[in-house]
Amino acid sequence: MSQAAVDPLFRPFTIKGLTLKNRIVMAPMTRTFAPEGVPGEANAAYYRRRAAGDVGLILSEGTVIDRPASRNERDIPSFFGEAALAGWRSVIDEVHAAGGRMGPQIWHTGATHGRSGWNPPAPKESPSGLNGPGDANGVAMTDEDIADTVAAFASAAASAKALGFDVVELHGAHGYLIDQFFWQGSNERTDRYGGATLAERSRFAGEVVAAVRAAIGPDMPLILRVSQWKQQDYKARLAPTPAELEAWLSPLVDAGVDVLHCSQRRFWDPEFPEIDGENGLNFAGWAKKVTGAATISVGSVGLSGEFLASFGGETSSPVGVERLAERLEREEFDLIAVGRALIADPDWVSKVRAGETEKMKSFDPASLAELV
């Protein structure tokens, strides 16, 4: 890879007064290395290494809000409580000391199943007590539950601002709580939080976004992660047309979202090939086109295999990022999130910039068992 070929990845990007030194984002990746929900020295060192390796923006692993069953694994970190917030203060201080920028991803796992089989002490909650079609798992949320959950998201975001984080991301993708409201397969409500249309089922997300925006003020960038696919159904599509995509996402941008983090399994896959062909805009490209908001793309960047295969034990080898840089050069999207390549190698960004292809590491799923 020549310097010129990757140059678009290393241009600064500014959003709401926050300038990032490059276009590379560390994707949020659940690591479950926070005993009792409290991040410690190992977590702070893990994120500091990525900041020192020149990642433009670090997004933390999912961090849960203050609800009785907001996590589906025991050692997912909390973003509430004195001990956990003290741990996160150490994390952001370490990242800033290394010249990095960072935001927490704020999360509620809804009625999803964890990989380990662990269950929270309280019943899981979701719009209709469903994890997906025919998969009852927990209880349907009452109006009071919903109001308290909206407030808990806002409280976590306010804590992020108070601790000195640079951005906040809300996890509204992959079949977790916010996404369970979006998806008709898990939202069968007949009140104002349900409905036949995606726009109607987006009311809960809109209330969360508005409450978080009020909590962090007008100047702190707010990111929302969204996806068509669900862990419950990889083929699910919330918005099968650009018009439906606009009807879904534009109101959320109007409510206060600055950046849409558009998750797909392979960044080069076209979102609507029937409209613009096999090399057409991806999910992030179409989201930017229909809303005008900045977008983050993601999906199997820098590696030969896509991430779902890694859960089956598949190793992925390094690949070039020239196609990615070409899309950034065309301004199809604004930022690119990198996941497994950065788990395997904290210096991946520096190696891409220097053209040190021979020094890049393969991704071995065994690396998920430790914080490198």
Image (cartoon, grey):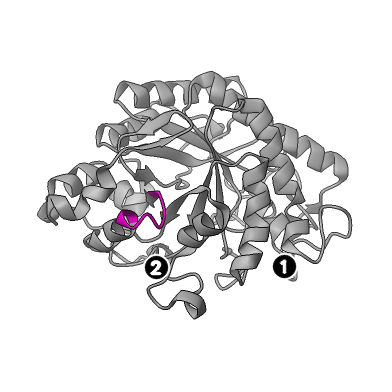
**Magenta run includes residue 330:** yes
Q: Which residue is mark 2?
A: 309
Q: Main secondary structure of the magenta part?
A: loop
**Bounds of the magenta span?**
328-335
Q: Which residue is mark 1?
A: 185
Q: Could you tell me which residue is drawn at 64 percent across and 52 percent down?
A: 250
Q: Residues within 10 Å of mark 1 (few under 14, many from 20)?
A: many
Q: Depth check: give the residue in front, 335 or 177.
A: 335
The Cα atoms of the two marked residues, 2 and 1, are separated by 25 Å
Q: Is residue 14 above or below residue 246?
A: above
Q: Is residue 103 left or right of residue 314?
A: right
Residue 229, label in figure:
none
Estimate the x, y position of residue 245 in percent, counting from the top left. Answer: 61, 62
Camera sees residue 28:
yes
User: Of the residues shown, which amino acid type is indicated by label 1?
Assistant: Gly
Marks 2/1 in contact by CB < 8 Å: the verdict is no
Q: Residues within 10 Å of mark 2 (few under 14, many from 20)?
A: few
SS at badge 1: loop
Estimate the x, y position of residue 356 in percent, counting from the top left. Answer: 12, 50
Camera sees residue 80:
no
- Within the image, what quadrant is residue 80 found in? top right
Estimate the x, y position of residue 188 in percent, counting from the top left. Answer: 81, 63
SS at badge 2: helix
Q: Could you tell me which residue is drawn at 70 percent across and 40 percent down?
A: 208
Q: Is residue 39 left or right of residue 128?
A: left
User: Of the residues shown, which amino acid type is indicated by label 2?
Assistant: Ala
